[in-house]
Image (cartoon, grey):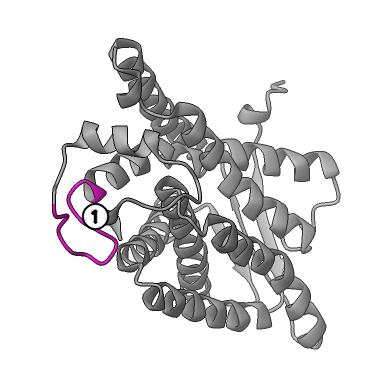
Amino acid sequence: MQSNLLATEIIAQRVFNPLYIYLDIAFLVALCVLLVVKKKYLTLLWGLAGGVLYMIVDYGIFHLATHSRSIEGGDLFWVLLWMSMSYGITNFVWIWLWYAKDKHLLEWSLLIVVWWICAPMLANTFGQNLTPIKIQRTTGAYHGYMALILVVGYFAAIGYNLFQRDRTKRFPLLWMLAIGILVQFSWEFSLLLGGIRSAEIADWGQKITTLVVNSLLETNLGAVPIFCIYALVTSKFTETLKKRETPVSFLARVQELNAMKVREKQIAPLR
């Protein structure tokens, strides 16, 4: 009998009040508007792309291909569309801002995390007469594929760093690892705290297993590819979707990012 956490069948279950959907949609619209007001057009586009990607994975792979999704009390397609856009936008926007070392990173981070924590409580209080929705997926059919993507990404980055003599051009592995784990952990912990994640699962060991495994694996598998995409795109374009006055190579952009500190004034071409 296998005792390894990563070898265990993980049930990713959510039980939530339908009002949560409408409150969250309002938050997503407000977040997108705020990004436009702050002229973070590139970040917004990346977040929208994240929502589309999550929908392709969640509906196309988790539901249609592996049949691991099930739902009670709602329409699977529309609930998955909302979930995908919700966590796709917030996760991808947050990761992009972390890689940018945005000067308002603390404020953006609090905006997202505070909402994740408070939204379930608001929905439960003001929508208490509504019938809850339960949606869940098993993970045995695809966690191995996720692990493959993770190991290929990190091994490629580690191999590159081992042979890159210029330290300023190496990938910031600890930074990528911290972001990859932090974003998913914040999301998972907020769901657990709000009574959404694993709500009908009494075994706290299984609840914690889901929290730990998902935090280590699910967003973290994209940490290296997303960093490469960020460095490549911002080597040529600014946040306002204009071409940089002085485009740089991919490695030169990695060098720039390594030299930047969180909350410091950004270099002029990236404004």
Count up the numbered dots: 1
Query: Which residue is nearer to you in this view: 77 or 158?
Result: 158
- For disc 1, the marked residue is 269
Q: Is residue 259 above or below residue 270?
A: above
Which residue is drawn at the image coordinates 29% and 12% (left, top)?
165
Tell whether position 126 is magenta: no
Which residue is drawn at the image coordinates 30% and 63% (left, top)?
42
Packing grade of label 1 (10 A; few <14, some 14-19, many >=20) is some
Query: Which residue is nearer to you in this view: 109 or 202?
Result: 109
> Which amino acid type is marked by label 1?
Pro
Q: Is residue 133 left or right of residue 262?
A: right
Q: Is residue 24 left or right of residue 170?
A: right
Magenta stretch: give its range: 234-245
Return the x and y of residue 117 as percentages of the image width and height.
72, 64
Which quadrant holds residue 223?
Answer: top left
Q: Is residue 3 visible?
A: yes
Secondary structure, mark 1, is helix
Q: Main secondary structure of the magenta part?
A: loop
Q: Is residue 140 visible?
A: no
Q: Is residue 52 above or below residue 220?
A: below
Q: Is residue 177 above or below residue 245?
A: above
Return the x and y of residue 254 as percentages of the image width and height.
30, 34
Return the x and y of residue 151 as percentages of the image width and height.
43, 25
Query: Which residue is nearer to you in this view: 78 or 32?
Result: 32
Q: Is residue 225 left or right of residue 79?
A: left
Quadrant of the image containing the C terminus: bottom left
Tell whether position 238 is magenta: yes
Quadrant of the image containing the N terminus: top right
